[in-house]
Image (cartoon, helix red, strand yellow):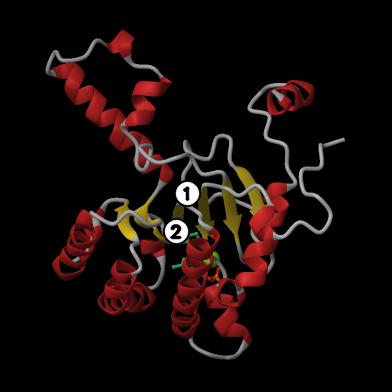
Amino acid sequence: MPQEHVQAGATVAEQRLPRHVAIIMDGNGRWAEQRRLPRYMGHRQGVKAVRRVVECCRKRGIEVLTLFAFSSENWRRPPSEVGLLMDLFVRTLRKEVARLHKNGVRLRFIGDRSAFDHKLQSLMNSAEEQTAGNTGMILAIAANYGGRWDIADAARRLATRVAAGELRPEAIDTELLGRELSITDLPEPDLFVRTGGEQRISNFLLWQLAYTELYFTDLLWPDFDAAAFDEALRSFAGRQRRFGKTGHQVEQDEGA
Ligand code: IPE
Ligand code: IPE
Ligand code: MG
């Protein structure tokens, strides 16, 4: 029997909270198609859901929120959809960064940004620079991101150091490789959420999700609201994280 951590009637504020939540925001296209709207309208509606969830995280005191905005495989979509997504990305950054900054949010982008056009790259760079000194929540946006790319990129950097004679191959271990990856300077994701009904990782944070609690919901991303987010937090609070130990050991550690 998993240990029940949530007391009956405990409010979200009283529960054990994740420090880092990572979300695959899926289902925008279907949200639009169900309404006989162009898929693009679903992406636009999805931006509103992003705003809501960022606010929820800030209110709840979650330290890091990582959002999967565009995967390295999403280039395979029709060029018209990719183009509209890029335009939306640019417009959203122009519109939202000032407010995020005012709210003390620190923005980060992970993924290979060299594939984006210069206008978008410079918006990403300046959003990071502008918010770098903020001490509030960290919002990491994964754009042209792939978990396999992340690991390959880390391996390439270590290989370069080996080739330069700065590193012995025997010194490479999980800790050293892990340190070269995206966002490993931040707490590991505690809770992973995927909307849209699909139960897969789709090349998101492969390494970083090793011990993350997974939560899937059929809600489409534009319908994901504060109540749905709190439901995910409640599910998280009810889980026992063992990290390879026995449940009994974990209870003893917690009692200590
Ligand atoms: C997620 O929604 C947003 C991106 C991948 C950019 P989708 O566009 O994948 O929505 P569905 O899965 O087709 O409904
Ligand atoms: C994952 O969603 C990527 C993002 C949400 C940005 P997809 O809709 O691209 O995933 P698959 O193709 O269904 O696995
Ligand atoms: Mg999808």
Q: Is residue 140 visible?
A: no
The image position of residue 108, as x and y in percent, is 31, 55
Q: Is residue 147 above or below residue 164?
A: below
- Residue at 47% x, 36% y: name it: 207
For label 2, the residue is 68
**What is the crowding at mark 2: few (fewer than 14 residues within 10 Å), some, or many (at least 20)?**
many
The image position of residue 52, as x and y in percent, is 51, 73
Are the residues at dot 1 and dot 2 in contact (C-beta closer than 8 Å)? yes
Q: Is mark 1 within 8 Å of ligand 2?
A: yes
Q: Is mark 2 within 8 Å of ligand 2?
A: yes
Q: CA distance from mark 1 to mark 2?
A: 7 Å
- Residue at 25% x, 24% y: name it: 158
Amino acid identity at mark 1:
Phe
Q: Quadrant of the C terminus?
A: top right
The image position of residue 208, as x and y in percent, is 47, 38
Residue closest to the eye, 71 or 216: 216
- Where is residue 27, by image quadrant? bottom right
Q: Residue furthest right?
A: 1
Residue closest to the eye, 186 or 93: 186
Residue 30, disc: none
For label 1, the residue is 204
Task: Tell me if 214 is positioned left or right of 235 in this view.
Answer: left
Amino acid identity at mark 2:
Phe
The image position of residue 59, as x and y in percent, is 52, 65
Task: Tell me if 232 is positioned left or right of 146 in this view.
Answer: right
Name the secondary structure under disc 2: strand
**What is the crowding at mark 1: few (fewer than 14 residues within 10 Å), some, or many (at least 20)?**
many
